[in-house]
Image: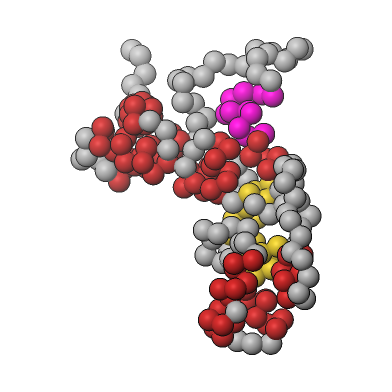
Amino acid sequence: MIPHSRPVTTEAEIAERVGVPLATWRRRDAPHFRAHVASLFPNSRYLIYDLAQTDAYLTGKPIPPLPTDEHPEDHLDAKEAAAILGINAKTVHAYATQGYLSRGETLYGTRVWPRREIEERRDNPPGQGKGGGRVAGRPQPRRKAHPYQNDPRLQIATDALAATSDAPISHTATELARQHGGSPRTWERLLSQARKAEQPQHPPR
């Protein structure tokens, strides 16, 4: 997580600042630095650090702690967003591609989203307004054609059917649960709905 309003830096910028090649800095200086300054996204391809903590380390000053309070403008990576939404990090990226979330912002190779957007999506599932239920003065929304209408996982299930058309649906559901979270039974329902949607609809005579 990148706390609200906290500038960040990378190892490449740190090496440039101290005037040594990045490879030299990583071999000679990075182990000691990393022992004192934690990366904000330790699983990211590019390690990102808080600039104030980095400055303190380089100037020999006490390293200030990061804020502990959550803020709506904190920036979260896919793994952190997934923990809030109760899904897999891969599904977070799928949601962003399908428009269920925004595409986010890329910082030094890491895709991030503001905490407020993730929490708003958690509190307002597809097809529901804030607080749920009918809003006074507005017409009653149409009922869903099926329980998974507007669920972005339905597109994932559709794509999986196209890629694994010969596989038993239970096997495909188990693999989707492993990749994206949720139960195999839920994914079986999604796959069944996706398969039903692919069947041609004949108008009544």
Q: Is residue 128 magenta?
A: yes
Above-or-below relation of 40 to 117: below
Find the magenta span and give its range. Answer: 120-130
Residue at the spot 25% in from the left edge and 37% down from the top edge: 171
Rendered-image quadrant of the C terminus: top left
Question: Is residue 98 visible to us here?
Answer: no
Location of residue 54 (image quadrant): bottom right
Is residue 139 located in the magenta-colored stretch of the structure? no
Question: Does 192 sit left or right of 35 as displayed?
Answer: left
Q: Position of residue 145 (x, y in %)?
A: 47, 19
Looking at the image, the residue that sits furthest to the bottom is 20
- Look at the picture and state if 9 lies above or below 1: below
Residue located 22% across and 35% down the image: 168
Tell me the residue at 72%/81% (across/down). Answer: 17
Locate residue 132, reporting x and y percent: 65, 18
Q: How many marks?
A: 0
State which quadrant residue 138 falls in.
top right
Does residue 87 show up? yes
Q: Is residue 115 left or right of residue 126?
A: right
Residue 119: percent from left, percent from top: 65, 36
Tell whether 192 sits left or right of 88: left
Picture layout, residue 204 above or below residue 201: above
**Main structural element of the magenta stretch: helix, strand or loop?**
loop
